[in-house]
Image (cartoon, rainbow, N blue to C red):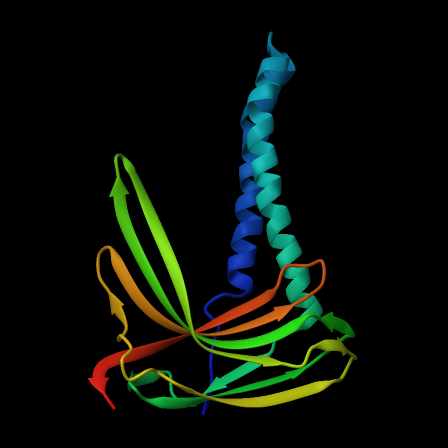
Amino acid sequence: MQKNRSFSGKNRIWVAVIFGLVFAICPLLFIAPNIIGGDEPFLLVAIIVPFVLVGLGFAGYGLVHYYSRARVGKPEIMISNETLRVGESFTVNLMHTFKRSVQIDHIKVQLVFRETATYQQGTDTRTVTHNNIIEDYELPSGKFTSGHFIQETFNMQIPAAGMHTLSVRRNALRWFVCLDLGIPKLPDYVDEYELTVRPEMK
């Protein structure tokens, strides 16, 4: 059994923070001299305010998610085999020690089959994603004190009638083990661990 890296984590959060700050600060740096010496400063301010607000929104989104993850800590997920055949079983082991007291609304571990399709609508390109929850496990939630340790093992299986992993130009079929911890008044802590399912049968 091997420790697995999550597909979604701190990297995505920091991308949102950095992008938001750049999006907010760059318009100010470029337009500030024109505002100071320009004839129509109010017009320039009206133009850049929406950009600054959007940038701050992205940065705020990232910081809130970072705080949410900091409250929980980093759970450890170990998957017995992340390269599987259709119909094959595998085990998922969850271990976590809470570093601080935190209220948890739910703890879910799911096997998810994700379908993604990209299509053209006029001049716009649209992407549609649909998650099919194949298996769903939920652990007891509540108030967890600092030092509380949880460990659970889940037996999962790629369905015998399931599809294999696929990635082509406009469509993708992907499998994930998803960990979801709900925190009151904060975004959920969500990590995804991708599996590769080969087309051969078990």
Residue 75 lies, with reference to residue 132, above or below; the image says below
Q: Residue at x 25, y 43 (%)?
A: 120
Q: Residue at x 30, y 43 (%)?
A: 125
User: Percent position (x, y) of residue 174?
Assistant: 34, 69
In the picture, residue 96 is in which quadrant?
A: bottom right
Q: Looking at the figure, which quarter contains the C terminus?
A: bottom left
113 relative position to 26: left or right: left
Residue 58 lies, with reference to residue 74, above or below; the image says above
In the picture, residue 134 is in which quadrant?
A: bottom left
Task: Single out the residue that lies furthest toward the front.
Answer: 161
Residue 82 lies, with reference to residue 166, above or below; the image says below
In the picture, residue 184 is in which quadrant?
A: bottom right
Q: Looking at the figure, which quarter contains the N terminus?
A: bottom left
144 relative position to 58: left or right: right
Q: Nearer the viewer, residue 78 or 89?
A: 89
User: Percent position (x, y) of residue 58?
Assistant: 57, 45
User: Percent position (x, y) of residue 190?
Assistant: 55, 67
User: Percent position (x, y) of residue 155?
Assistant: 46, 90
Q: Residue at x 60, y 23 (%)?
A: 32
